[in-house]
Amino acid sequence: MQNSNYLIGRQPILNRSGDIVAYELLFRSAGSENVAAVLDASHASANVIINTLSAFGLETILGPHRGFINLELDLLLSDSITILPKDRVVFELLETLQVTPELVARCRSLKADGFTLALDDHEYDPIYEELYTIVDIVKIDLIQSPVERLEEMVARFSPYKISLLAEKVETLEEYLRCRDMGFELFQGYYFAKPSVMEKKRFDASGGHLLKLMRYLHEDAETAVIEQAFRESPGLTYKLLLLVNSVSLGMRTKILNVRHAVATLGRKQIKRWVQLALFASDGSSSPESPLIEMAAVRAAFMEQLAGHLPQFRGKQEAIELVFMTGTLSLLETIYAISMDEVIDALKLTEEITVALTERGGIFGQLLRVAELFEQMDFTEATRLFEEMGLTREEVLNSQVKAYSWRKTMQ
């Protein structure tokens, strides 16, 4: 059974001045007490990437620093990893990787694209000569390579433009000796044990992901791809958070799912979905009734908006109404605060006011939908009549909302 929360481990990496400059991001499994039950390294790494991008967001988990991520060969060769911002990550090549022409070529390509590469748990070996001219960082495990025999190894690395990182530093003496030998980066229990960050899981069924992947593979129309996201409130939230993670510094507001798709681009979305499928354990379960409610609520509000004069000919505004309905139940579905949702997503003021105060026309539409769900038809009637909607228009909108949701299952 999957844990209901996202888990990710994080251990700081410090420079010679003792300042945190990066974090190694570590897979953490459900029920583990700061340990990882890793059956497949690529599955673990894919989970780390997906959780970093789509659950926590880069800014939340890394702040201004970079993230080190372990990669096995299959994930290293996958184009999907280039969804990550090149200035925010360091790809760690696991010690189990064999030096082959394919590996060297891939490393050269990633380096040419601007990515930073590191060799993990490494000991000097002439077989890696070609990689030493490519990688930026070499991580040396002090348990595997005790301090007493490091000087000779450090000397062998001196011809290369490589920063040395001492990992599993457990004492002040080890830190000082490594610093004196020229190590530039440090990581280990002496500074901090890995901490576990946890966040309520935003479930998206494998069926939705597979459908979305198929649409992307078939180069479907944007409207079709948008529809695939609209079927799942969790996926909609992830998409918007993903835009913010990989488009850091973006100042414009996300208007709707279509805007998010256009901003991120099909190629990036395809990579994200590939990683999400990679991270999936293949299990599926029925969606929560609350997710069903969110989808129907969003469609109901959209239908109501279509009957209002101020929305005629304004499809973008109607799409904003749908998004408002989709996001309005996230607080209940995933046990997170609406403030957190608003802070994480660059929502327009109109949506923010609707979600927090039920203000503005969006907020009024949301309130009508909520009153219908609560079966408070007296208050709902008073409100929709004030808005200029007829009983027939409202009932037709409700029927269409349920009919729309039924076709999505």
Image (cartoon, helix red, strand yellow):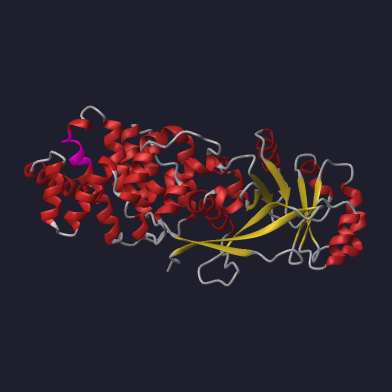
Q: Classify 43 as above or below 133.
A: below
Q: Nearer the viewer, residue 20 or 401?
A: 20
Percent from the top left, x then y, of residue 95?
A: 72, 56
Q: Nearer the viewer, residue 313 or 187?
A: 313
Q: Which residues are magenta?
A: 302-308
At a point 39% along the width and 39% down the height, the residue shown is 348
Q: Nearer the viewer, residue 235 or 78?
A: 235
Left or right of residue 9: residue 112? right
Image quadrant where one finds the N terminus: bottom left
Q: Classify 191 as above or below 239.
A: below
Percent from the top left, x then y, of residue 353?
A: 34, 45
Percent from the top left, x then y, of residue 132?
A: 80, 43
Q: Nearer the viewer, residue 243 or 405?
A: 243
Can residue 20 be seen in this snapshot?
yes
Percent from the top left, x then y, of residue 150?
A: 89, 59
**Magenta stretch encompasses residue 304:** yes
Can residue 327 be seen in this snapshot?
no
- Which residue extends farthest top? 313
